[in-house]
Amino acid sequence: MAEGPLLDAAMVETIILTLKLAGVTTVVLLLVGTPLAWWLSRAGGLWKEVVATIVALPIVLPPTVLGFYLLIAMGPNSPLTALLGRKLSFTFEGLVVGSVIYSMPFVVNPIRNAFEAMGPRPMEVAATLRAAPLDAFFTVALPLALPGIFTGAILGFAHTVGEFGVILMIGGGIPGETKVLSVTIFDYVETLQWGKAHILAGGMLAMSFVVILAMMLVERRLNRARQ
Amino acid sequence: MIGAAFRGRLGSFDLDTAFEVPGQGITALFGPSGCGKTTVLRAIAGLMRLPEGRLVVNGETWQEGRRFVPPHRRAIGYVFQEASLFPHLSVESNLRFGLRRSRGAARIGWDEVVDLLGIGPLFDRPTAMLSGGERQRVAIGRALLSQPQLLLMDEPLSALDRFSKDEILPYLERLHASLSIPVIYVSHDIAEVERLADTLVLMGGGRVRAAGPIAAMLADPALPLIRMPQPAAVIDGAVVSTDPVYGLSEVEVPGGRLVVPGDLGPRGMRRRLRIPASDVSLGRHAPLDTTILNALPARIQGAEPEPGHQVTVRLALGADGQGAALLARVSRKSWDRLNLREGELVVARLKAVALADPAPPLSTRVTPAARTATS
């Protein structure tokens, strides 16, 4: 069992890295996912279904499959690498890109549902009250979809914290750069450091429980305030 | 003047409407459910774009050919069937939403709207805590404060119960009396139309059947309105005098004067009277001993036989037959016994004359001076 302080420097480093990855990923997901969810909730036709399917793929694909293709796309010989001038695999930025794609459906779906649930009426009302489309989006659609956006942010954050397969494929375990919690726990188990694994795994379990419970409670409050 | 012409296919039926209505007063788009009234209203608002359309409102072209002004650039106010208040905003913020975004000088003032609709006491309540009637009043206020040049109302009362309807109607009448912006009002309830409308656009099956002043339309033998189960005439008149002793008012209408129960307000005040055809009987002579207060000369314009051995007689008040249109529903037996004919002069006896709007009289137009006085 672990001696001395509960968390050693390596564990603290991995926790901070994980939170940083999840935070950056969530911000990117909200910035990309909200307009995408809006478009999916309003558009019609085949294109919308195709895009919605692509967004949903990470739910069903094994993380190794997604990770494998991401590794190739971000590897030394890919067009993306040529375009950027540097490779993204085995970097923090690469992890962000992978996490954004992997967690996308968990953010887009609740926001899209919230946009769809409000129906076309609020935007029509806003238009008849002289609000231009962008104005109406920020002053009517976004506030009305706030519970869904909140849910999406929490789910995106939690899902990124818990991500393992994709990260393992594209990031490996460079301490301080790409070695996140889930990979660290795996390492501890591999090297039979059960005590450390217990601390991190138990911590994640407790954190996930608290996060999801808090989300449910806040969502309930937000919804109640609307009725 | 508002000129609208829209054509297009909508689901299972073709819409092909064209009408011109005055740029003032209340115009009712009236017809059965599903006849395309709401579609026309949405097309006027720009919420829906019909491929073939032409819309000119008071000289401004909002749609013609490839020109299509988006809804947020049209100076309209739109009141939906359900109030559709923004749930994330307070009552006051809902009201300010359109006002903040309106362009040009505010012709319709905050205090004026708040007084007119009686919504001042609602400011502090969450929108979810308002009754149906209160919500709709706020929605009407919100639309008015966006400074529309044209107010569109899509069956604003149909989602409300009887009580809330009776609560809102007087406000609509006040609005009518005190604001000069034209209103297009969609309804399938003839009682509302008789009470509020100046102009009627009669729709059916995606087409405009007829359009014109309400009084003439109600008595037009070519239109189905006269064959409704309870046809009635509406007559607009001006108060001449009131008799507080007997609680009666005298109202000048085209072709005569009518005595109406109640104090109808100061001299010169415009009031609308509704006279059901079943409350009018006809005679050849003025009655001598009768409790009926109103017996006026009128000319027979025509007669429409009804099922059930009745006849709906079309009359025009006045010995010259130039006055207001009136309807009388009499038995066919009486019609034959009196040997009545078109063009003949008769005496119309009005059993009951009632205000179309039983609401208390609206004092006067709210002027800027009055606004300052109240604020």
Image (cartoon, coloured by chain):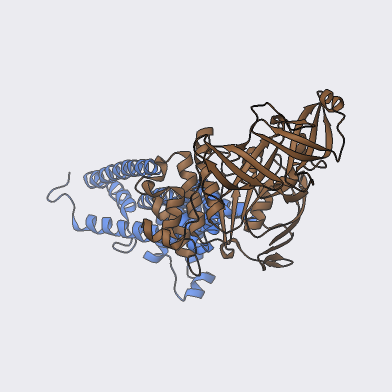
Relative to A13, does residue B216 appear above or below in the rendering? above
Q: Residue furthest bottom?
A: A85
* A172 relative to B246 in the view: left or right: left
Q: Is residue B123 visible?
A: yes
Where does residue A46 sit, x and y in percent of width and height?
Answer: 66, 53
Q: Which chain is blue?
A: A
Who's the residue at 46% across and 76% down the image? Answer: A85
Q: Nearer the viewer, residue A89 or B359?
A: B359
Snapshot quadrant of residue B158: top right
* B176 relative to B52 in the view: left or right: left
Q: Which chain is brown?
A: B
Number of numbered markers: 0
* B333 relative to B327 in the view: left or right: right
Where does residue A98 sit, x and y in percent of width and height?
Answer: 44, 59
Q: Nearer the viewer, residue A223 or B57?
A: B57
Q: Quadrant of the N terminus of chain A?
A: top left
Where does residue B299 sit, x and y in percent of width and height?
Answer: 80, 41
* B322 relative to B101 in the view: left or right: right
Q: Quadrant of the C terminus of chain A?
A: top left
Relative to B157, does residue A27 appear above or below in the rendering? below
Relative to A192, does residue A8 appear above or below in the rendering? below
Where does residue B316 sit, x and y in percent of width and height?
Answer: 77, 43
Q: Nearer the viewer, residue B36 or A136?
A: B36
Q: Is residue B11 visible?
A: no
